[in-house]
Amino acid sequence: MSVFTLIISLILVLNIIAAIFTVLRSVRDIPTTWAWLLVLIFLPVLGFGIYLFAGRGLSAKKVRTIQTEYRRGTKAFVAMQKHANTHDRLLPAAVSTPAARELTTLFLNTASAPVLGDNSVKLFYDGKDKFAQLFADIKQANDHFFVEYYTIYNDQLGTQLRDLLIEKARAGVAVKVLYDAWGSLGAGKRFWAPLIAAGAKVEAYFSSQHLISDFRLNYRLHRKIVVIDDAIGYIGGFNVGDQYVSRKKKFGFWRDTHLRIRGNTVYALKVQFLMDWNATVPDDQAEPYAIDLAPLSPEALATSKIQLGKAPMQIVASGPDSSAQQIKYGYVKMIASATKSVRLQTPYLIPDDTALDALITAALAGIDVQVMVPDMPDHPFIFRATQYYANYLSRFGIKVYHYQNGFLHAKTLVIDDAIASVGSANFDIRSFKLNFEVNAFIYDAKIAQQLSAAFDEDLKHCQFLSPQVIKQQGHWLRFKQYFSRLLSPVL
């Protein structure tokens, strides 16, 4: 054996030992453990570089910081819930079905999420419409504007948003911007400097700091929240960038779903934003939660000039700071509660075993389960893993559709045309366990039916994943799907 061969063999042996020690020293579920072992062993040395940025868990200090703010913010949620109960509006009788009652209880127990009624909701499916409305609302702001996005790009749309905020900050409006540094590559200090100079406060979410010593690529701020003057709130799937208004040829039309909310739920969005903001900034820059804020009383509604709807909602956040996967629990509970139909739209279909079994069990129980995914990639491994699970689910009678009119980025779930979820969380392991996500769960048949009608419209631009279509997939494509599926826990 040559010296070179001996050295290589020694490196490989040491790499395997180091891989086993590195992965097993942290408590993980078994699929994730095997996935990381696969990466570290089959990518010697390089795999440890990947693990350094993508495999380490949140530091104990960061977890404590988030949990401390969670406890503080929860006091505001509890105050809201007590007020709602005082007025007997936990759930109106018309929507107080067993499924709705059980789901609301789940979120009260796992996320302290208050059920807030008297909301008007406007749905957006096209980024051009959404941002036209958002920019119009910004121009009307006169007290404060809070914005939180995973992605704010340094491009035409991102610059337009920043410049509008500069105008409002100069006019005395309190402007706060929270973004994810990894998701907003290109929008660095130079991009934000004019806004900060105008008096606004801009922060990268705390998990984005210290790029070498403390950077965790895996844990991203994926939430999308806007709060304007405690009167208007936004939540959904759109980020800020030209591709989200269909200006990128690569993606074509960008199909997403976003909510504009007026009513009591805006308070819950504000508290969630402040929890994220206060977890990021030093203690002396933290904002009070104003726990005396309460949903509008019947008397206030009667005299208000704002004509609100009645849609009850819960704002539910989840993230790696908690072992309770609140949004995933909600998805699974919704699917299990369905008696007629399940309609899911997600750009990334990489479920864990629990979510996978929920879909399959519903289908085998005779529920009409329909799943819509994109027909083009924005991340190659994720796209191939999505294809694998789409093929797999189709074996159980689940109707899978590939959207072909651009890129489908909507994260929506509707059951029985009665209960719906819209937010930032994809139907994948990353959103369930690794990202900081937020969704609105809506107990209103009218809104659920609007989302279902949008699903029907999207079907006109889809290819049904039939057995014949699956058979036409070549061996190389199948290999890429199976290989990507092995990496699912770390994608």
Image (spheres, rainbow, N blue to C red):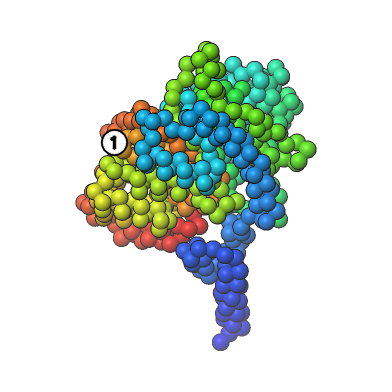
The foreground one among 309 and 211 is: 309
Instruction: Determine whether, in the image, residue 216 is placed left or right of residue 366.
Output: right
The foreground one among 9 and 341 is: 341
Instruction: Determine whether, in the image, residue 218 is placed left or right of residue 414.
Output: right
The image quadrant that residue 230 belongs to is top right
The amino acid type found where label 1 is placed reads: Leu
Q: Mark 1 points at which residue?
A: 459
Instruction: Determine whether, in the image, residue 290 is placed left or right of residue 28.
Output: right
**Residue 54, image x and y in percent?**
58, 56
Q: Residue at x 63, y 44 (%)?
A: 70
Viewer can see residue 46: no
Q: Residue at x 60, y 80 (%)?
A: 10
The foreground one among 73 and 393 is: 73
Q: Is mark 1 on a helix, strand or loop?
A: helix
Viewer can see residue 336: yes
Q: Residue at x 30, y 50 (%)?
A: 362
How many numbered discs sit on the rendered protein?
1
Against 78, residue 117 (above or below) is above
**Residue 182, image x and y in percent?**
60, 44
Residue at the far right: name it.
284
**Residue 353, image x and y in percent?**
40, 58
Q: Quadrant of the N terminus?
A: bottom right
Q: Residue at x 67, y 56 (%)?
A: 59
The image quadrant that residue 442 belongs to is top left
Against 75, residue 453 (above or below) is above
**Residue 345, image x and y in percent?**
38, 41
Residue at the far bottom: name it.
1
Query: Dot 1, how many residues are within 10 Å of its Cα: few (below 14), some (14-19), or many (20+)?
Result: some
